[in-house]
Amino acid sequence: MSSSDVAEIAFDVPGWPPIKNEALSLLSASHKQHDRVRALLEAAAVASQSVGWKVTDRLVGLDVTLRAPFGHPAGDATNYLGGIGDVLQDKTNPINLDLSHLGPLQQVALYLDDRQIVRVRYDVEPADSPSYSVRVVVLRTP
């Protein structure tokens, strides 16, 4: 990693994270969580532009802090983490999936493949309304 590479990106997203809990791709135009996917991609796009983030091929850590009413999320950690992991990976070569409904958001990615995630941290905090923070940290070369 050169000294000009950004080693960390963090951002907040309003609402619940996308949940991966069915065979239909979260990126499908007909997925019931389409709005959650768009919100995550929009927040990642703004943060990426702000810090100069480039899609990494390195191993990464994913930290998620979910803020939920009464401290009780609507879903479970593994489904939230899977949804976030999938949405933030590279989408330039989808197999049998039209992503044109995402417009420029289909180009938003923090890493090439969610298999690069080798460290995960997940926390839940009580809040008046749902929101979450995402932090991706470059750890080392693959």
Image (cartoon, rainbow, N blue to C red):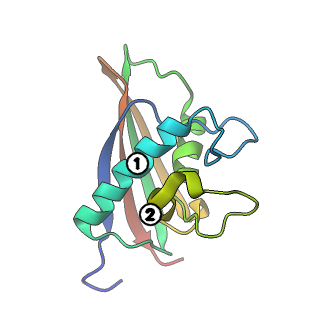
Kindly report the distance in space between the C-alpha atoms of the residues bearing marks 2 and 1.
13 Å
Question: Which mark's residue is nearer the viewer, 2 or 1?
Answer: 2
- Work out whether residue 59 or residue 36 is closer to the camera in this orientation and state it: 36
Camera sees residue 135: no
**What amino acid type should be assigned to the residue bearing mark 1?**
Asp
Q: Are marks 2 and 1 in contact (CB under 8 Å)?
A: no
Helix, strand or loop for disc 2? loop
Q: Which residue is mark 2?
A: 110
Amino acid at circle 2: Leu
Which element is circle 1 on?
strand
Q: Residue at x 40, y 35 (%)?
A: 123
Residue of label 1 = 63
Q: Earlier in the sequence, mark 2 or mark 1?
A: 1
State the residue at coordinates (39%, 57%).
Answer: 136
Q: Quadrant of the N terminus?
A: bottom left
Residue 64 placement (x, y as % from top left) = 41, 43
Identity of the residue furthest to the bottom in this view: 2
Q: Is residue 3 above or below residue 18?
A: below
Can you give x and y, in whole percent of width and height, for residue 85 in the image? 54, 51
Name above or below for residue 73 compared with residue 53.
above
**Direction top: furthest residue:** 70
Q: Quadrant of residue 8?
A: bottom left
71 vs 81, left or right, is left
Tell me residue 61's x, y (percent). Answer: 44, 58
In depth, the one of 8 and 90 nearer the eye is 90
